[in-house]
Amino acid sequence: MVVMSSTAVVAASSRPVDVTDPVITVRGLTKSYGGRTVVDHLDLDVHAGEVVGLIGANGAGKTTTVEILQGLRRADAGQVRVLGLDPVAAGDRLRRLVGSQLQSSGLPDRMRVGEAMRLFAGPNASDAEVLLERFGLAGKRRSPYGGMSGGERQRLFLVLAVLNRPRLVILDELTQGLDPAARHEVWSAVEQLRSAGTTVLLVTHELEEAEALCEHVVAMRDGRVLDRGAPAELIARHAGAAVVRFTLPAQDAATVASMLQELNRLPGVAGVVREHGQAVVRGSATAIAHVGSWLVRTGCPVPDDLRVDVPSLESALLTLLESPASSSTPASAPRPRLHTDTIGATS
Ligand code: ATP
């Protein structure tokens, strides 16, 4: 099924990006299906040059929202403006200004890359060869869609989404089902869009992706916003502390006690306990650096059970999703969910 508009044209905004320019303005957007509200008084602002992510639970209303933004569905209530236009009333005009890759994007298996590029190119399209090269698809012009890998297909959709120099690109589940290498290739492609000043609205369940690519994220559940902000802000608000754990390089009780006290005094450390023979240090990201430095200063080998649990956007979202349904931001201290990385394993 071909879902991209072959009429997509121009808007070649060679004008400098003004980050105060509103690209998407949504106020009180509400949508119900069969009496069930799936988007509930949503407000959303995306400015020129930003990469903004919609994240959240399955069925949170993310896809419904981006479909409404593209005029593919009608809102029941609220105000929606995309590049100053009403997506329903000015749908044709908007399709020339917005590039998209939707969950349902697809091309006929036998269609070759070059044919797709010609089909979708408007009068002011970018140079196809240059784009294919930039997105790692050089030499694929004659390849049929059906023979391409998942990563190549997604990069082709990105190429098609930006072919006509859109002012806004909407990407829904861009890297779903891709292997890690292909995912990183697609992320690099999105990075390129960001560097070029393209405004991107990204719907994703890949929180590493949202953390890497988005300036702002909006966390949704049941059609409502749970919280929004920079990934680092959501992490700071909801993901809990960093935790460093390791076996202390000492045996006797007096040295162990004095080491625990030293650790407790390090900058950024919020608390130190002993659990199962290990020191467990909780604190900010600063604490991680100081604990590492302290370990080196002891002159002992780095403990081979050294682990660092880094607060991540995933842990922040999990905490948010566990919050009571009535609250838009959880009031109580969240239970930390931690993403574990081993940062040292030498003995
Ligand atoms: P996911 O992350 O799983 O893709 P989402 O956040 O994108 O979910 P939507 O696809 O917008 O969520 O769906 C929101 C809710 O609306 C879901 O419960 C879904 O089943 C329902 N829904 C979506 N489209 C329709 C439709 N055409 N008719 C009835 N219900 C629908």
Image (tube, rainbow, N blue to C red):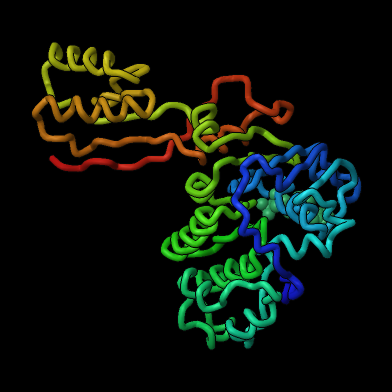
- Horizontally, residue 138 falls left or right of residue 78, namely left
Picture coordinates of residue 219, whole percent (x, y) = 64, 39
From this view, report whether residue 164 is shown above or below residue 202: below
From the image, which quarter does the N terminus lie in?
bottom right
Could you tell me which residue is drawn at 20 percent across and 28 percent down?
293
Q: Quadrant of residue 103?
A: bottom right
Picture coordinates of residue 206, whole percent (x, y) = 54, 51
- Horizontally, residue 316 falls left or right of residue 168, namely left
Picture coordinates of residue 91, whole percent (x, y) = 84, 61
Could you tell me which residue is drawn at 28 percent across and 20 percent down?
274
Could you tell me which residue is drawn at 25 percent across and 18 percent down?
263
Could you tell me which residue is drawn at 75 percent across and 51 percent down?
83
From this view, report whether residue 178 is shown above or below residue 214: below
Q: Nearer the viewer, residue 87 or 241?
A: 87
State whether residue 202 appears in this view.
no
Q: Nearer the viewer, residue 294 or 25?
A: 25
